[in-house]
Structure formats: structure tokens, C-alpha cells
Amino acid sequence: MYELQIVHLMSIEAFPTLVTPNTPPFDQFELVREAKRHVCRVSGAARKYTSFYVAGVYGGIATAYALGCSLRCIFCWSDSRDHQIGRRVSYYSPNQVVEELWGAARKKNVRKARISGAEPTLCKAHLLQLLPLIDDSGFESFMLETNGTLFGADPDYVQEVAQYNKVHIRVGLKAGSPAGYQRRTGAFGDGFKLPFQAIKHLLDAEASFHVAAMTDPRLMSAKERTLLIERLTELSPQLARNLEEETCDRYPSTQRRLEAAGVDAIDFFVRRKPLNPLP
Ligand code: SF4
């Protein structure tokens, strides 16, 4: 009788929390596996969250702040993406998440909700049990802000998510070239294709979604921005026309990550100089 042994090739400590100019790139699917081990629980389809409150963006939106991501973007603002061991966090079932979101929404009289601060698609069973509860709740809409890693790799997952009425997906593009992707996310550059694949799958599923991109000229060259828009136009000229272009704001966590990546914060945020050299 043989016992199935699960071997974890890389522990969570092997992945960078800060990407420096000398950090070797990592396999984002290895990070997905490790992150899931730390933030998703099979029992009760639970996921780790840090807090629930109404954020001012989107005109006020009840937000569940989750842990765990498949990337390590150098411009990221989130304190919870790294799912550090020892943080004061708890597992929440899908029912508990809806209760917490609704409690926060009622206090501020808002009817929109989202998961933020991490990659919301990471715990598949959790998300697929949460979405029907949202459909049955008093919320008008539910925003999923994804980096496209898992939706790019799994068209069936996209089909399942797209069937719910209140979900709207925002795909965040980080790069228009492999070099830009590797420099800004820490993952191997060939992963830059994944969010474009995710967009293809979302189009096929006729999902409600739009595309955002971190095209801040301090982080992305004009040439790479053109490549990104051309690639998006090939998939859908309408999506390209409606592209939401993001700029990098000065959060303490963002500044810490940019400085680790070799960026002078004063040059970047005050003098508004671009990364040197831009990939
Ligand atoms: S910006 Fe988004 S995709 Fe990038 S590390 Fe932060 S949470 Fe993850």
C-alpha cells in the first residue's frame, strides 16, 4: 500500500516579499500553489481575510480585504498580498464574508461590494460559493479585480464565474511585454500572456468585464504601452477604447516596494522621473 505524498518544491519563504534588481524571477503557478496552502481552507470553502469596511473608491464600496496573490508587483499598495505567517487574520466562510460585507455596507448605505488587497480568484471553491450568495443578497454589484493569472489558465473557471448576474470583472494588465512583466511583477516574463488569455476567455464567456492597465509613464515606456494597446485591440477594439489607465499613487507600502526595486522615491514621486531604464 502506497501513501500519496505531497511534496512542496518551494516553501512560501522562498518567494520574495520585496522584488529587488537582483531577485531571480519566480514561477507564478508555484506561488499560486504555496499561497493557496496558506490562505485557502478546504473545510467550509474558507479564505483568509484581514478586514471588512467601506472604501471610498467607486463612490463607496463594501470591501473584503483578502490575503494572498500570485504576483509581487513593485508598485503594489496592498499590505495583505504576501499572506505573511503570523499576521492577525482569520478564515471566513462564504456566508461569513457576505454577512461582514453587508454589515459594513448597511452602516454607510452602499450597495456595491468587492474583494480587494489580493488575488480574489485564488481560492476557487470559496469564490464559487460566494458568488451565488452575492446574487441572492441586497448588493447591486460585485467587483472582482483580478490579475488574470488563474482566469488565463482555466477557461472553465471563467465560464463558471460569468454565469452570476451581479459580478463584474476588472482585469488588471501589468505589462505589454515579457521584459516589462518580469521587471514589475517579479514573475517569469512569459506570464505576461496570461491576462490577455483571461480577456479572451472572458469574451468567449460573454462576461461583464473591463480592462485596466498600469500604464503610468514612470513605470511603462511609451513603446510598451503601444504594444499593450495593440495586443488588446486585436482581442477587442472596444475594450482598448475603454481601457482604464492607472497611475501609481504614493502609499507607504508602494514606496517601500519601489525603493527595494532600486527606485529613488523622491525622484519618482516628487520629480516624477521614470524608472531608469524603463523596460
Ligand atoms: S498589484 Fe495586485 S496583482 Fe500585483 S501584487 Fe498587488 S495585489 Fe497582486
Image: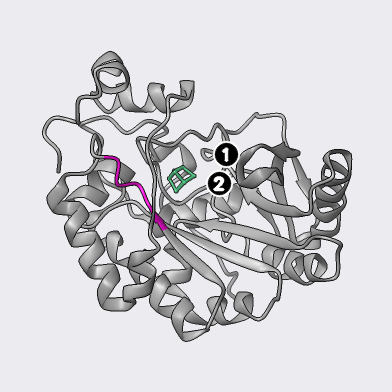
Ligand 1 lies in quarter:
top left
Tell me what residue is drawn at x 81 percent, y 55 percent: 93
Magenta segment main secondary structure: loop
Tell me what residue is drawn at x 67 percent, y 53 percent: 114
Reply above or below: 239 against 51: below
Q: Which residue is mark 2?
A: 118
Name the N-terminal-most of marks 2 and 1. Answer: 1
**Quarter of the image where the C terminus is located:** top left
Q: Nearest the camera: 52 or 260?
A: 52
Give the residue type that dot 1 points to: His
Residue 76 can be seen in this image: yes
Q: Position of residue 187 (x, y in %)?
A: 31, 49
- Where are the magenta residues, as a range? 212-216
SS at mark 1 in the image = loop
Cα separation between marks 2 and 1 = 9 Å
The answer to whether mark 2 and mark 1 are in CB contact below 8 A is: yes
Badge 1 crowding class, 10 Å Cα cut-off, few under 14, some 14 to 19, many 20 or more, is: many
Color encoding of the figure: one colour
Tell me what residue is drawn at x 86 percent, y 64 percent: 137
Q: Nearest the camera: 248 or 263?
A: 248
- Checking the image for residue 180, the label placed there is none
Residue 65 can be seen in this image: no
**Quarter of the image where the N terminus is located:** bottom right
Q: Nearest the camera: 123 or 141?
A: 141
Q: Horizontally, is 162 left or right of 97 in the view?
A: left
Q: Which residue is mark 1?
A: 83
Q: Quadrant of residue 105?
A: top right
Q: Nearest the camera: 158 or 60?
A: 60
Q: For the residues carrying marks 2 and 1, which lies nearer the camera in this image? A: 2
